[in-house]
Amino acid sequence: MRVEQKTKRVKIAGMGRALAGEKINFGHQTRYRLLPGQTILELGVEAADQALKKSGMRIEDMDCIVCAMATPLQAIPCNAALIHEKMAKGSSISAIDINTTCTSFISAVDIFSCLVDIGRYENILILSGDTASAALNMEQRESYELFSDGAAACVLTRAEKGDLSEILYSRQETWSEGAHDTEIRGGCGLMPAFCMNEGNRDDYYFDMKGHRILKLCAKKLPDFVDRCLEDARISRDDIHVVIPHQASRALGIIMPRLGFPRGKYIDRVEQYGNMVSASVPFALCEAEETGRVRRGDLVLLMGTAAGLTANFLLMRY
């Protein structure tokens, strides 16, 4: 259903990123994995501290801590509560999780920009990051050599008078015919950890059916992107840069089919691989640091996630 959207006067005031400590090369592909004793919680806090510093704010200035992650740090409480314990213990700042797996960051910016725009919150700290290496199956080379462990964060706040920043349009759709093309079946309610045995051990590892995902994306994404651009009344030429989820090396196949030639979009798969929920914010943070993205640029955040879920968010940075 088409819904008329109003521009949201919000901005990303600061960003941060952090990589796991072990560097691994698979041919020309570089990946990063957590060192023994290193945790994604630590990387998330490191990225969040950077974002706060760049925004000129402190954790006490935040109204809400949002963890936009694909995987739980532990079964309960929510990830955001554990980040809260590390960064804001003793305060009453609210803590909330958002999970659409790989596109969790885009979903969080989408949802919480609405709450900032209507005045429910003023300053939001959003963190993304996953220990992707924890559940990889060495027998599935396609996925084992694809993922990295990393984190990224941003401070989302209301745009002030004179700021160019705004979110012009956003959309999310889910096509659940792809629900089982990317999954970890075991470890939760449908297949608890205590049910693991030699016969079902593979169910507790990450399982990705790359060709099926690519086929579904090729079928669904072109129309999805066309509809979003039409609704937003924006042409591809108007967009300064596209920051897609760094899903795989198939990025070079999919993006031109969506009308975005090489050079129009950020592709860092060779350098970092897929960092799950951290992929989009990490790439955006790096693009800002290197001058690829500047204030006032029209930037498109987009990607697909397990489900199969697709996100599209058009912002003036």
Image (spheres, rainbow, N blue to C red):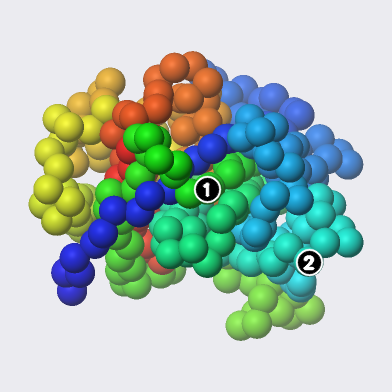
Residue 147 visible in the picture: no
Q: Nearer the viewer, residue 275 or 181?
A: 275
Q: Image quarter for residue 198?
A: bottom right
Q: Amino acid at mark 1?
A: Thr
The residue depicted at 73 percent of the width and 42 percent of the height is 58
Q: Is residue 37 left or right of residue 271?
A: right
Q: Position of residue 16 (x, y in %)?
A: 62, 34
Q: Quadrant of the C terminus?
A: top left
Q: Amino acid at mark 2?
A: Ser
Residues tagged 2 and 1 counted as in contact (Cβ below 8 A): no
Label 2 Cα crowd, 10 Å radius (few <14 / some 14-19 / many 20+): few
According to the picture, the residue beneath numbered tag 1 turns out to be 157
* Mark positioned earlier in the residue sequence (2 or 1): 2
Q: Nearer the viewer, residue 95 or 39?
A: 95
The residue depicted at 47 percent of the width and 33 percent of the height is 284
According to the picture, the residue beneath numbered tag 2 turns out to be 92
The residue depicted at 35 percent of the width and 54 percent of the height is 8
> SS class of the residue under badge 2?
loop
Residue 106 visible in the picture: yes
Q: Relative to residue 166, is residue 202 depicted above or below?
A: below
Query: How far apart in space, not on screen, are marks 2 and 1 (Cα)?
Result: 19 Å
